[in-house]
Image (cartoon, helix red, strand yellow):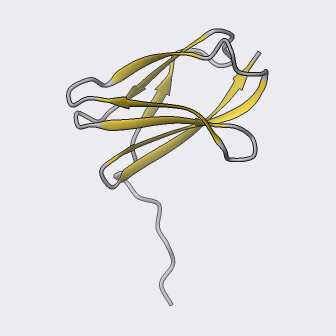
Amino acid sequence: METAKPSSDALKITLDTNPITKRLSVRTDSAGPTRVEINDADGRPVLTRDLITGNRAAVLDVSRLPTGQYIVQCSSGTRKGAKRLMLE
């Protein structure tokens, strides 16, 4: 029986500050096209941004989102990564 191993090829995500209030700065280690998605606590997407090739960072306006916990998910090709986020 095989056991799933953590992927060393997971997409690395960096959030400039956490918790945040108005703007979220997200950076990834992907040089290719990347999708950044913020999901609420129930897993529903509330904000999505597509980054073009060569752009490894995005600043997202989250001032209209209610306070609470969110998940930032990024995907580029087969690589994926996620981080928890607290919005105050």
Q: Give the residue at the far top of this rendering.
A: 22
Q: Is residue 2 left or right of residue 52?
A: right
Which residue is more in the foreground, 17 or 6? 17
11 left or right of 68 in image? left
Counting labels gives 0
Residue positioned 77% across, 22% down in the render: 66
Q: Give the percent coordinates (x, y) of residue 70.
A: 68, 34
Which image quarter is the C terminus in? Answer: top right
Which quadrant of the view contains residue 86?
A: top right
**Which residue is drawn at the image coordinates 59% and 15% (left, top)?**
17
Question: Residue at the spot x=70%, y=21% of the render?
Answer: 65
Q: How far from the left and from the top, in percent, is residue 63?
A: 66, 11
Residue 13 point in image, percent of width and height: 45, 33
Position of residue 14 in the picture relative to residue 32 (left or right): right
Front in this rendered view, residue 82 or 5: 82
Of residues 17 and 35, which is closer to you in this image?
35
Could you say where residue 29 lies in the image, as x and y percent from the top left? Answer: 32, 33
Residue shown at the point (21%, 31%) measured from the top left: 53
The answer to which image quadrant residue 28 occupies is top left
